[in-house]
Each structure stands twice: as C-alpha cells, then as structure tokens.
Image: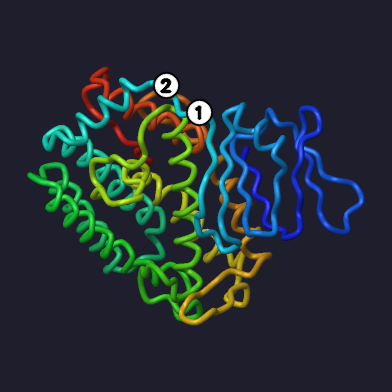
Amino acid sequence: MRLIVDTQGTRLRKAGEQLLIEREGQETPERMPLNVLEQVVLAGRGVHATTPLLYALLERGIDVVYQSQRGRFGFRLVGPVAKHSALRVKQIQVCTNPNQALALARAMVAGKLHNQAVLLRRYGPALNGAGAAAIRLIAEQLQRAQHALHADALRGHEGSAAAAYFRTWPQLFAAERWGFRGRAYHPAPDPVNAMLSLGYTLLLRDIEGAVYRIGLDPLVGVFHTLDYGRPSLALDLEEEFRPVIVDALVLRILRQRLLEPTDFTRRGRNCLMTDDARRFFFAQYEERLQVRVRHPTWQQQLTYRQCLQRQVEHVARCFQGREAIYTPLLIR
C-alpha cells in the first residue's frame, strides 16, 4: 500500500518493524507495519521523517516521494538502483532504434485509444449523436495509429483522438456548473482539470516507481520525446492506464457528486483542491488501484496496481527480445 502524509507538523519515525505517525496535538501515534508499505509520500515541507526510518524504508525497497501539498512532484528517494545493467543497455538500444521504438509506441497508443472508446461506450445513454461520432473518430484514429509510419504521425493520431474524447465530457456531467470547457493543463483552470492533473501525477509516480524497481530507466522512452528530466518511459506506460484509472475515477466523482465545486479554491489562474478534498481524492485513487480486472494477456484477476507492475515487466521483456510484441492492458 501507499502511505500519503500531508498534515503539516507530522513526524514519522521507526519503532521496531513499525512506522509511527506522530501528529501535533495527538497523544498516541498511529502505527503501521513496514512490511505492508510500497511507497511513502510526504506532502509539504512541514512533514518530517527521521533518518533511521528513511534508511529502513530504502533498505526494504520502499521508495519515498516528496511533493508539495498540492501534489506537485519534488523529488524521490530510492534505494540502490537495480543491478540489471544489461537490461538498461537493451532498453536504450530499442528506444534509439526507430523501427523497434515505433512498434512499441504504436501498441501503447492503441491501448490508450481503445480504452478511451470503451469508457465512452459505458456512458452510451448519456451521450448524444456527437458522442457516437467521437467514438467512431477514436476508432478511426486507432486504426491509423496502428499503421503510423513515424512517431510524429502517431502523436497526431493520439492528439486527434484525445480532442474528440474530451469534447464528449461536458455531456456526462454538469459541465457549466464545474466551469469545464475542455482539457487544459498547467495551470488547471477548473476543478475537473485539477482532478485530472492530480490523478495523472499520482499515476505517473506509481509507474515511475515500478520502472525504477525493475531496473529500467524511466527517462528513456519510445513515444514521448526525450527531454531533460522528463520520465518518457513512465509517460509512455501511463497512456493505456489514464482512461481506466484516472478518467473513470474523475467521472465517477463528478456524476455521483462525491465532491462539489465548493471543495476547490483559486490561487491566481490555478484551481486547487482544499485539503479535505485532496485527502478524499487520494483515498479514492487508492481504492481505484485495488479494483480487480481480468487481464487479457495472463487471463487472471488482478488489481490495477498489479497490472501496472505486470505491464512494466512486460515492456522489460520486450526490450530484452524475450517477447516480440507489446500487448497493452485492454478493458472491455
């Protein structure tokens, strides 16, 4: 499990094989066994962890992520990098080979577009003719993406499908009430985009952690262009999971009115969650990762968190040449 601590003034320390959470004004600390943790997230500069605890976490392969209270990534602490240097060499060889990289990128983008179309079909009764047209357009772009001749063309198909996909969203909830006019990035101009951006950030951190643990380099990918500090491989692997984890979660929150526009505040042009809303969203995201689905490749019931790890392992085998084709997680 992942532990997220964002209450300022909190101190984390180690006691035996347990992590103790000491909050200001709370006499008895909360206790958590170290062996159940996969990641610890410390949000804000007022959350502190002792050195003995950090050593214990890193020795057990539990990475520690520092971020702002609003979810902006700061840095992460990880234990010794996996000693699989041959795997990273294979990764770089594949990612710098245009044909091999393109084959992997096509499959990843196809997975995203497939999952976007399936998610929209689930809301069929709420969509009018424009929604059906968007699903057809996504299907067309999926077909073209599978035969794209170069990465720029593939990005064009992915972008066209994403634009059609998000054009349907205002039909699925009270968009005017939420001030939603379409997908927008930094700064998030409305609560819907604020939830999407936070969800994608959480998802990226989970995938990046899985990439580190297996010994791959998260900065070297096949679809997202290489840039200083950009976790291109983690972003590549995130694509197929965005619709099924984050988008599905945000739509459920909106349609079931689990949060309200009053749960958000504005700082300049940026729309931000209140502290309580952010904690609620964190909890809902963690619950989403525990949802079980039947993985089409392994024909097993796995949680989405397990699927993340399996897909990272799968792409590692593709880099090594042990598996010829990358198969994304496709929902039904």
Q: Helix or strand or loop: what does disc 1 sit on?
A: loop
Q: Residue furthest front?
A: 51
* Residue corresponding to mark 1: 80
Q: Nearer the viewer, residue 312 or 51?
A: 51
Compared to residue 202, the image places residue 270 above or below, namely below
Q: Which residue is mark 2?
A: 83
Which of the 4 image quarters holds residue 51?
A: top right
**Element type at mark 2:** loop
What kind of residue is marked 1?
A: Pro
For disc 2, the neighbor class at 10 Å (few under 14, some 14 to 19, many from 20) is few
At which x and y percent is residue 295? 41, 30
Comparing 80 with 153, the one in front is 80
- At 36% from the left edge and 65% from the top edge, which residue is drawn? 127
At x 26% / y 65%, what residue is drawn?
Answer: 163
CA–CA distance in space, label 1 to label 2: 8 Å
Identify the residue at image location x=56%, y=55%: 67
Asked if the residue at tag 2 contacts the one at tag 1, i.e. Cβ–Cβ closer than 8 Å, the answer is yes
